[in-house]
Amino acid sequence: MKRKAILSNTAKYIVMSCIALIVLIPIYYLIVTTFKSSTEAAVSPMSLPSALDFSGYKEAFTAMQYPRAFRNTFIITLTSVVGLIIVASMCGYVLNRKSKYKITNAVFLLILSGIMFPYQMSILGLYKVIQGFHLMNSLAGVILIDIAINIPFATFLIKSFVTTIPIELEEAARIDGAGTFRTFWTITFPLMKPIIATVAILNTLTIWNDFIGPLYFLQSREKDVILQEVYRNIGQFSTDWSSLFPMMVLGVLPLVLFYVFMQRYIIGGVMSGSVKG
Amino acid sequence: MKCKKAAGMILSAAMVAGLVGTAGGTTVMAEAGDAQTVTFTCWYDEDDMAPILEVINEKLGGDYVVEYTYVARNDYNNVLGTQLAAGEGPDIIADGTNFPARIKAGNLKEITGAAYLEGINEAGFALCKDGDKVYGVPSYGWFSGVWYNKDIFEENGITEAPKTFDELVAACDTLAEKGVQPMGFGLADGDTAVHSLMGYLENDFYETSEEGKTFDEAFAKGEKKMDGTINDYVKQWSVLIEKGYINDTMVGISNEQALNDFIAGKTAIFNGGPWQYTNLKEAGFNFGMIPNLGSSAENQYLNGGPAVSFGINVNTKNEEGAEKLMEALASVEVQQAFVDANVGGFSYKEGVTVDMPEEYEAVKEILENGNVACSWDRWSVNMPSQSLFDEAVAQMQGLAAGSLTPDDFAKALDIKADSIRYE
Amino acid sequence: MNNKVKMKSNLPYILMAVPALAIFITFFIVPLIFTFTYSFSNWTNYSPEITFAGLGNYKKLLADTTVSIGIKNSLVYAVVNVLLQNIIALPVAVVLNSKLKGRNFYRAIYFCPAVLSTLVVGYLWKFLLSASDYGFVNQVLNKLGLDAVNFLGNGKIALGAIILTQVWQWFGWAMVIYLGNLQSISDDLYEAASIDGAGTLNKFWHITIPGLAPAIKINLITGMISGLKVFDIVMSLTNGGPAHQTETILTLMFQKFSEGNYGYASSFGIAFLVISMILACILLGAFGKWERRLGQ
């Protein structure tokens, strides 16, 4: 029996390690190639670089106008995620607590339809709307779009989660004389922490990596995000590897750092909020 | 718990530091010059544009500084199209065969009668005019052709450069027999195979047959179809594919890679144009250019026309700067810089001197005769022709891979044209 | 009277729901209505006047051969991609939920590609899969004595290559969702089954899979919908080529859009809506049936 367990464990390790290797090789390739010339990379793709030369990164940093692009991406992501949490948590809360009304359920269904239909299909209409509000080529426009398209799923998660918060706590606060708003922000909202964390992490990843929104709604270079800079510089498939690969790495670095710090939460169950919902 | 908090704090500290740092960075950038910037976008990369920009900035005399943005050729139509649709875009709009489409869409300011238009000959305005109204100025004249490696040709006993399409195929046969890869195409993103085909058509159909001379105009209007007209010519040209000189492997290779292979001597023939001259010259080997050939060695034609034209964005917020930049772009000095950056290209501007190095021996006469034209410029009277050209490039991949027949190719162009004609 | 009191006591709630609703309706529902209207017009960049075109755009859509390729590709991509991802992710999640040493290490690695932007992943794999001498995957195949494969240049396999890169990138995401769900399956169930003499496989089919129903539902539905709107990876890997053979609904729609063919592009959006709706209905119906069976 014990021998069988050891055998099966060994098999598990072998399979898991093989998968890990397949996952890691492209990432390893991405990183080591940033330090190689085109020829070196072509001849010995898997070897460690012969020298650690950061000049490629320096050039890429300048070519991509990195600080500005980073700031734009950061502002869009942070504002969208915070805005989303504020509006979706209130809305999800109301939809849960007032679910006895028919109208509430109708509204919930309307919002739910947003999960089923990708917004990309109505991008032409969206284009007109954004133009009408004079939000074209502004970060605010992209932020509003990012909030709008993520409202359905976030509201859905929050509405389901609110079920687990006992209503008695709110009633107690009400007896103490707190109004609806205060009760929500001081009593209910803090108890929503787990699901807020899920919403925050999920949306940080998707909004940071959103490409279509900025591509079609931010036209001038001062307004563009990191991915647009990657696209602008690598769009033409070029053979100048020593400048291309650092750009790719700079393109993904911020979120990789985010992941390194948040990794324990992400793989440790934050995402499971979306299952329980 | 402690660890979690620490991680969170480091993360937020890093982000705040990033923000503060970047804020500082941008301010410095903005303070760098007192001169106002004026923007323009094009598909020549920053290195190629650097010497031209230098001349432009000199010409602007310090009041304005040009801010140039490079957008890859494949994406240019997409990127510029969306910008203009949004009422945004650079101060100066640059475009090639789609310039008439920009006029039609009302993206460009009329500049009829502007002083800087003087000295530019009529052919240069081919894409810049709508009736008598002028909307732009040309840069230089492009043409496409076939680069060949003279050393490889001679080593394999080919002493005469091919003068007809059949001779070209024969040369490829000889090279292939000797174990040399004759042609290199990068069809993943390159349009050179379409140039080869359209060059063949220009010589054997458009300029030399009665039907050909009026076909493109009728086609643009929707009166005639590609299918049933060009099929046989495409079939004849497809010999290059049947013999494997253009093949499915090339569909997975980029044009730049194909150019590098040609420079490295791995292939004997590479389709391109004057914009590669400096690149090839620096590599230090013996090369020459022949035109895209048809079946006759007499009275040949090249695919070509005004390369890129410039006009003022109707929505520019910097009208004075845009005027100044237009003036600079149309000046002899800048027009000269464009030709210098494309050795072999010709000019529409009086006073520009053109250098024709010996590598262009075989095309010199054709250029002198003014036998330069291309289909897609003719299509532009009734459609955004870049879209149809792009379609031809996409369908060429299928033709090269053997998944499409010449008939399919012609039909695909008709379907595309049907969906993009103005009227 | 009663209604008024109700209204008054509910007012704060209404106010709390309004911001989300206002943003959602303005930037989601209204654009949808606009797009629907445009799809019946011949609005282009070149004719400033928008005129009614009836079903013209839809007729054009049916006649356009690339459209059927685009729809087929989007469907194939969505279905194959989601199946492969989950077939890998589910067993991996089960293994990494057992008391295996180093399981957190494996989890962290498997999820890693999911934080990379799809655009960059596309550029990276374009190098790896290249048919040129430097293409790493082909170098490996050569060393193993196999012929080089023209992954992105061969229209018959290019879509497959695209799917593989996306399975590589996203199976870790699906795995994490399964892991979260697995924590909620009680150990008692397994113990009871062991006492009844059930084997490992038996337990997997009769306890694990039914217990994972919520995660399977989430993974399949979100995977299917994000599969239908595939865009970034196609743009960076093949740009729809060769010869339109990897074109998807979205790449085609954006192509018409940038060509200035707005009315026509809108009809793509609506066709896209109809397909998504049908798929969503099929999926939801299937899950409803399964859940009812589990409930019995």
Image: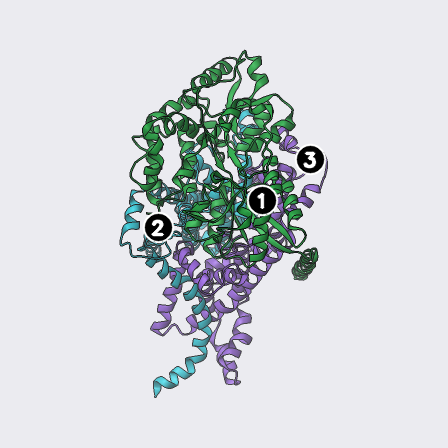
Chain colours: A purple, B green, C cyan
Camera-side mark, 3 or 1: 1
Q: Report the residue marked by disc 3.
A: A49
| Mark-to-mark CA distance, 2 and 3 | 51 Å
In the image, which disc is placed on residue A159? none
- Picture quarter with the C terminus of chain A: bottom left
| Label 2 in the same subunit as label 1 | no
Vertical arrangement, residue B368 with respect to residue A104, above or below: above
Q: Report the residue marked by disc 2.
A: C264
CA neighbours of label 1 inside 10 A, class few (<14), some (14 to 19), many (20+) = many
Vertical arrangement, residue C225 with respect to residue A145, above or below: above
Task: Examine the rendering and report whether any part of residue A122 can be seen.
Answer: yes
Q: Tag 3, which chain?
A: A
| Mark-to-mark CA distance, 3 and 1 | 24 Å
Q: Quadrant of residue B167?
A: top left
Q: Name the residue type under label 1.
A: Asn
**Secondary element at image label 2:** helix
Task: Examine the rendering and report whether any part of residue C111 can be seen.
Answer: no
| Mark-to-mark CA distance, 2 and 1 | 31 Å
In the image, which disc is placed on residue A233? 1
